[in-house]
Image (cartoon, helix red, strand yellow):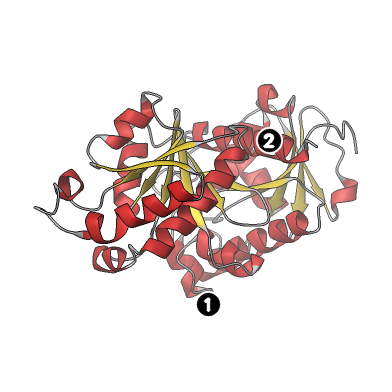
């Protein structure tokens, strides 16, 4: 291997029916990324060759069997080849249990490489939840799957987009279930995980804002009492622990205030409250980070983009941002 001072990142190919393989070829051809990190795709070399033929970027695919075989030469993309995509049945843009199993295998191997310290971080391409579940892996997405693989329960999703850092009390559950999950204990868990995660970005003393659950953060109980009964007591406990936490703030203004630089991060009460704010800044620019894991994992913020898969027209900006952020976090973690 060459230039071992640069962080080594495992990039999963995502659902083989999606645009992940094509996006990986575009990212790997970007010298701005490869000048600062070593990229190793965990996927299927045959499909990566197929994706390269579609995108036409100046790159060579090199299938390998072990990480030690990687050379990280300019213009060459090393692919840890799991040989698990069926060439006879593969199609872009369709839900397929074969693709769901392959996607799971990519994630599992990348997790293994991270856990044993072979790579510094993993960057995941998008998966299709229906394909994953039809393959027999009953998870709500990457967050639940990686939580299971790592054997941890207290995790949260953080979206990073154009200066915004948003963590969530709940994500892929119904709105009714999300409301029931707003508890003092869960808010404190997310705050603690968020503080640790944002410190991992090099911010030593993060200032966090907490969003309210109800319109206008309840308006002193006029529109709901969850802020008074649950959220404010959690914030008070956080302050007593010495954390820089304020709120609850109205959900329709707190994200703008954070984007303006008033806060280093925001804790959202449920999925759409945080996701809409981040994705309004550009779905192709955002990065998804799983906090609370013993490993570093970043991901694209968009889905599999089945509509454009196989056409070479998908936008690689989110993947590039995820790679840059993973390298930053890996470097930060390696500091004494």
* In front of the other: 220 or 267: 220
The label on residue 61 is none
Q: Position of residue 87 (x, y in %)?
A: 63, 60
Q: Residue at x 13, y 54 (%)?
A: 221
- Could you tell whether 89 is left or right of 273 in the image? right
* In front of the other: 101 or 170: 170
Marks 2 and 1, how far apart at CA? 32 Å
Above/below status of 203 relative to 293: above
Q: Quadrant of the C terminus?
A: top right
Above/below status of 153 relative to 123: below
- Farthest front residue? 240
- Farthest left residue? 222
How many numbered marks are there?
Answer: 2
Q: Residue at x 39, y 37 (%)?
A: 283
The quadrant holding residue 298 is: top right
Query: Quick one: label 1, few (<14), some, or many (20+) residues within 10 Å?
Result: few
- Farthest bottom residue? 136
* In front of the other: 237 or 248: 237
Q: Position of residue 302 (x, y in %)?
A: 43, 44
Q: Position of residue 124 (x, y in %)?
A: 59, 49
The label on residue 136 is 1
Q: Position of residue 243 (x, y in %)?
A: 49, 44
């Amino acid at each position: 291997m060459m230039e071992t001072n640069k962080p080594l990142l495992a990039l999963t190919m995502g659902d083989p029916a999606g645009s992940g393989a094509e996006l990986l070829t575009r990212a790997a051809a970007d010298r701005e990324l490869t000048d600062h990190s070593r990229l190793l795709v965990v996927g299927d070399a045959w499909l990566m060759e197929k994706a390269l033929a579609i995108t036409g970027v100046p790159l060579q695919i090199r299938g390998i069997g072990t990480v030690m075989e990687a050379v990280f030469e300019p213009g060459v993309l090393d692919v840890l080849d799991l040989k698990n995509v069926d060439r006879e049945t593969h199609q872009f843009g369709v839900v397929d249990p074969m693709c769901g199993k392959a996607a799971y295998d990519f994630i599992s191997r990348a997790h293994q490489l991270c856990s044993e310290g072979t790579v510094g971080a993993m960057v995941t391409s998008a998966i299709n939840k229906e394909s994953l579940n039809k393959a027999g892996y009953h998870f709500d997405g990457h967050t639940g799957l990686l939580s299971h693989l790592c054997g941890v329960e207290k995790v949260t999703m953080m979206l990073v987009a154009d200066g915004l850092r948003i963590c969530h009390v709940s994500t892929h559950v119904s709105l009714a279930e999300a409301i029931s999950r707003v508890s003092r204990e869960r808010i404190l868990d997310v705050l603690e995980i968020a503080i640790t995660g944002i410190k991992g970005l090099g911010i030593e003393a993060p200032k966090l804002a907490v969003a309210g659950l109800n319109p206008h953060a309840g308006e002193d109980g006029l529109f709901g009492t969850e802020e008074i009964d649950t959220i404010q007591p959690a914030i008070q406990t956080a302050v007593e622990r010495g954390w820089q936490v304020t709120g609850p703030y109205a959900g329709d203004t707190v994200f703008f205030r954070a984007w303006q630089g008033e806060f280093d991060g925001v804790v959202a009460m449920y999925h759409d409250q945080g996701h809409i704010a981040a994705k309004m800044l550009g779905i192709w620019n955002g990065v998804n980070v799983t906090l609370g894991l013993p490993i570093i994992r970043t991901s694209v913020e968009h889905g599999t983009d089945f509509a454009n898969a196989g056409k070479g027209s998908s936008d690689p900006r989110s993947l590039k941002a995820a790679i840059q952020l993973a390298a930053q976090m890996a470097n930060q973690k390696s500091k004494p």
